[in-house]
Amino acid sequence: MNRTHRNFAVATAASLVIALAGCAGNASEPEARTKTAPVATTVADTPSNATFAEWRAGFRTRAIAAGIGGDTFDRAFRGVSLNKKVIELDNRQPEFSRAIWDYLDSAVSKTRIATGQRHARNKATLLRGIEQRYGVDHAVVLAIWGLESGYGGNFGSIPVIESLATLAYDGRRKAFADEQLLAALRILQAGDISADRMVGSWAGAMGHTQFIPTSFLQHAVDHTGDGKRDIWAPDAADALASTANYLSSFGWKRGAPAVVEVTLPASFNFAEADQKIRKSSAYWQQKGVSAVRGGLPASDAISIIVPAGVRGPAFAVYPNFRVIKKYNNATSYALAVAHLAERIGGAQPFQGAWPRGDKMLSRTEKKELQTRLTDMGYDTQGADGIIGPNSRAAVRAFQQAQGMVPDGYVSAKLLDAVRKAGG
């Protein structure tokens, strides 16, 4: 799916995800989006000296062997050429990322909330039917729609076959693009959409809620009953139902929370503020954790997160939060979807103050941080400028060794401390 959605390179082959990198219309995220997808079928490597026409001929042979009709292939590829803009976007590695508070300001803006509420009223019958059929709260479906394409305002205009063919020929993740291109051809062969209407982001994410082709094949539904799974249709009915079906398949619990803002006691052990640590509501309450509003909803699998460290807001995240992350693995995205859904439903803004004066690290600085930590014995498992679980674990270990609060928060102040400690 995707949205500015970020980085086509960070997709992994672990489990299906709709939202891919390079989305069309949502707010840019402060952290890399890890997309997951089925393991790709083995494909032939593109010869380094092959022309696009030669690659296309070889791919046609493989596609036909995989069950794609020759006529389907030829119609789909009519007029398709190498798209230099797609190559440029695929190779773009942004040096700077947004702070989570800036991302949330945009993702959960007053305009996005109001538009979501208007759609909730105007599409009440449709949304009620989808919620009842798939057991997924309609507000979270609206929130994903709002983030993915601005409620259909921009889901991309690049022909999907052209974007994926370009990436399969000359992209950084050729095997993944090759797999998605085969899936896109299967969609065309099934008759769900015509090639001229199959448009999306530069990375091949499609429709109102930015499905990648493999996710479309597994989770898209024909909610309108017209015989087509049309996630591009102006009424967005199939797209919204498909999104609900996707979330349902990963275990969404209707009526259960995804995120609850909490207050932490002064004695809280921030080493436990980790999404890998899942405890019961009773456990956290015993530790002094309390909801900012009301009580802490019961669950046996709650994690505490502090996205901006000890000086920022704290949240209890529930199983539904992890379901949202199946759509897009960025914590910032899941937090935005959960909060936008709440705001569409009339909830109040988060109460905790963000450390807005903090300086975020550039990609180069993050690589430096990872390199320095690894050299000091806190292995980040690579220096790619993406702060993931391995890097945060290394940061926590460093913080603990230095007598700092082990909140895993990465900022310019942390990098200064690492530089001083490393000499």
Image (cartoon, grey):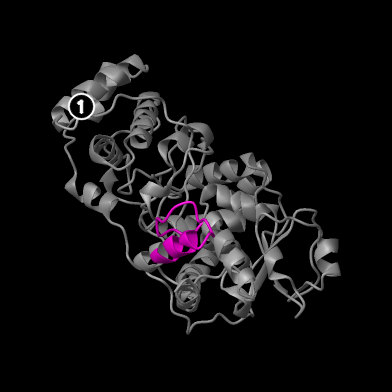
- Residue at 60 percent across and 65 percent down: it is 396
Q: Name which residue lies at 36% across and 24% down.
A: 189
Q: Residues within 10 Å of mark 1 (few under 14, many from 20)?
A: some
Q: Nearer the viewer, residue 11 or 276?
A: 276
Q: Quadrant of residue 303?
A: bottom right
Q: Position of residue 275 (x, y in %)?
A: 65, 57
Left or right: 405 in relation to 415: right
Numbered disc 1: secondary structure = helix
- Viewer can see residue 28: no
Q: Which residues are magenta?
A: 368-388
Provide residue 276's location: percent of width, then percent of height.
66, 54
Magenta stretch: includes residue 372: yes
Give x and y (percent) for residue 78: 18, 30
Give the camera-side residue of 250 and 284: 284
Q: Is residue 317 above or below residue 34?
A: below
Is 169 rendered above or below residue 373?
above
> Where is the C terminus found, in terms of image quarters?
bottom left
In this rendering, the answer to whether 30 lies above or below 9 is below
